[in-house]
Image (cartoon, grey):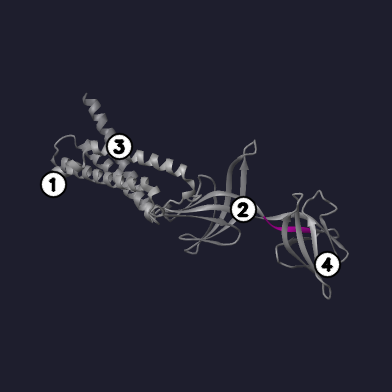
Amino acid sequence: MIYRTIKFLGNKHAGFILCMIVVINLAAGSLVMNMYPKIYPPFFPFNLNFFFQPVQTIHWWLYALMVTFGLLSINLAACFIESIVRLKDATTGKLRLYAGLLLHGAILLTLVAHIHDGFYGDSDHMMLTTKPTTVPGVGTVIAKSVNNQLHPDGSLKDTLAELEFQLEDGTTHTETIAYNEPALFDGGRREIIIQGGKNQPAGVALISADDGQEFSMLPYKPVAMAGGRLTLQGVYESRMDVLIAQFVWERISQQPQMLTIALSQHMTQHNKLKLNDQMFGYKAMITEPTVAVMTRYNPSVPIILISLLIATIGTVLLIQYARIQSKRA
């Protein structure tokens, strides 16, 4: 009676039909997400909990998909048990039965891994700068540099970002990430994936016309020069699309002065400051790297690797069985 029930649940035709229903559910989900994009976040997270907080009718395809996945898992589990029973009673052709057993087990593990990842995995988006940013499960990260590589026509080819990691175990190392080249941690369970990056303006470099001395001006960090104190208040864009730097010049016993210069090498009449009879000119923008990344946590990586190993062994056994059969023929 138990064996008949297992055989009924593991019906091959039912398994094929369930696979087709899975495909239909996925296609329906793709159409729903395309037709109602405002329902989903701009960068959709790899998290099934999104569909249950709260439960919504519009997500019917996902609920149907999970029911189908559950039925398919039962079907595969029944097939797996049936394969064990048949292998126990078989006297010949065990190689094929072993291969089938392993392949069914690999598919079942893959389904379990994806569901486990959907509920217990996590993803987040963050900006990395020259200031330490904490990444859960990894440590603190600092962006050291970013470089955008372009095609001859000027379109973006790749973005390379050099990151410095201060790991939770106290070790430090530097790694370069790029598109399709994430930084992996915790045996591949955690990864940092680049989504873009550029060098953002962070300050202004001034140069003295008298002795060529350079001064790095950062926002709200006063610098002593020319017998006074100069503070960068900010960088703004003018109506003529020219960047303007605004400074506050302070001297003892005098009222603070608001000064501005154009941040352009070509505007020679407007890119200089006169401080206490000394001239200071604009030299360059001070930039710092800013990298947009997605942090991904997938706790099911070990299960996926095990299922891949099992499927590989099953495939090798199946190929070996086919060779033996061809020789007999």
For numbered disc 2, what is the local secondary structure? strand
Q: Quadrant of the N terminus?
A: top left
Q: CA distance from mark 1 to mark 2?
A: 64 Å
Q: Residue at x 83, y 57 (%)?
A: 272
Q: Which residue is mark 3?
A: 316
Determine if the magenta segment contains residue 133.
no
What span is colored magenta in the figure? 201-206
User: Which residue, as the protein is rendered here, is positioned at the far front?
Assistant: 57
Q: Residues within 10 Å of mark 1 (few under 14, many from 20)?
A: few
Q: What kind of residue is marked 3?
A: Val
Q: What kind of residue is marked 2?
A: Ser
Q: CA distance from mark 2 to mark 4?
A: 33 Å
Q: CA distance from mark 4 to mark 1?
A: 94 Å
Q: Nearer the viewer, mark 1 or mark 3?
A: 1
Q: Residue at x 53, y 52 (%)?
A: 293
For numbered disc 4, what is the local secondary structure? loop
Which of the two labelled residues, at mark 2 and mark 4, occupies the earlier sequence position? 2
Q: Which residue is mark 4?
A: 226
For numbered disc 1, what is the local secondary structure? helix
Q: Nearer the viewer, mark 4 or mark 3?
A: 4
Q: Which residue is mark 2?
A: 145
- Using the image, determine if residue 81 lies above or below residue 247: above
Q: CA distance from mark 3 to mark 2?
A: 46 Å
For numbered disc 3, what is the local secondary structure? helix
Q: Residues within 10 Å of mark 3 (few under 14, many from 20)?
A: few
Q: Nearer the viewer, mark 3 or mark 2?
A: 2
Q: Quadrant of the C terminus?
A: top left
